[in-house]
Amino acid sequence: MIIFNQVSKSYDHNGARISALKDINLQIENHEIFGVIGESGSGKSTLLRMINTLEQPDQGQILVDNHDITTFNEAEERRSRKKIGMIFQQFNLLYNQTVKENIGLPLRLNKVYDETKIQKVLEFVHLEEKADHYPKQLSGGEKQRVGIARALITDPEILLCDEPTSALDGQNASDVTQLLRKINQTFGTTMVIVSHELTLIKQLCDRTAILDKGQMQEIIVLEKSEQQP
Ligand code: ADP
Ligand code: ADP
């Protein structure tokens, strides 16, 4: 479970303080797909990055599985991040490494390289055929599936998705949406999906928080739109 308790964050910008988030209260349940929707600049990325201790709030508490992550030292932050996967709008792949090398990267960094595991994840995202290709040889949707596979390889309990389909066209976006749903159904992964795209949010999210200029307006439950099997 992820809990935000009166969380606020502002940034310095040319000497002025810019408020990115103000008094955010949230509770995200285990196994839930939780959406955060809002316009550009509404604080979505900041909220997501805080769950991964990539940003620290100025005020408030953030609890992940009952641990206040805002009090963590560096070793605790590293440990906490191991339970969390992240995927990005622009995929953030290493372009001089193959699909397989990109996916294996977290295992190499954690010194637990495991060929069988990489193979399994490649199959899960249907990229077996592309294992030795480089990112520039892939479509946008395939690149995002590599990003997803790299996030999955450490068996995260939480998957943070920052505009996961915003750089993709219709078919690729819908493939990635279906893959995200399959991850939640197969592994019970808790997901936080931030996006400005109502289509994605409607297809996936159990509950959705609306952010406007750093303030949370309300949490809504949208009727799920038509889903392909
Ligand atoms: P979103 O993801 O909804 O576009 P962000 O969380 O990226 O929103 O940004 C929220 C606000 O905080 C914006 O006004 C943005 O300009 C500001 N901001 C975000 N990151 C920084 C930063 N590192 N330095 C200064 N201002 C920032
Ligand atoms: P126990 O295994 O006895 O239930 P905990 O899991 O609550 O104990 O915590 C044991 C130690 O590991 C504590 O110091 C706690 O702060 C730390 N710890 C537990 N879970 C995490 C986590 N997800 N990230 C970072 N540190 C953690």
Image (tube, helix red, strand yellow):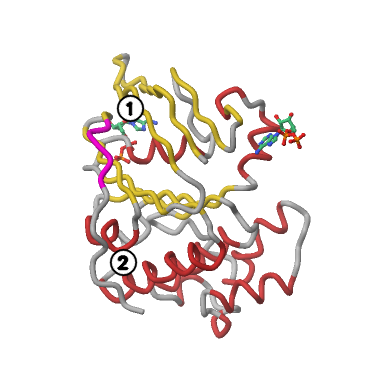
Q: Quadrant of ligand 2?
A: top right
User: Residue 21 has which mark?
Assistant: 1
Q: Secondary structure at mark 1?
A: strand
Residue shown at the point (56%, 36%) measured from the top left: 64
Q: Earlier in the sequence, mark 2 or mark 1?
A: 1
**Residue at left offset 37%, top offset 58%:** 164
132 sits to left or right of 163: right
User: Badge 2 is on which residue?
Assistant: 168
Q: Residues within 10 Å of mark 2 (few under 14, many from 20)?
A: many
Disc 1 residue lies near ligand 1 with CB under 8 A: yes
Name the residue: 75% across, 67% down.
Answer: 114
Q: Residue furthest top?
A: 15
Residue 173: x and y, percent? 32, 69
Task: Residue at 55%, 52% (x, y): give it.
Answer: 85
Amino acid tagged 2: Leu
Which of the image's four quarters has the C terminus?
A: bottom left
User: From which residue to which does the magenta span run?
Assistant: 216-220
Q: Quadrant of residue 8?
A: top left
CA neighbours of label 1 inside 10 A, class few (<14), some (14 to 19), many (20+):
many
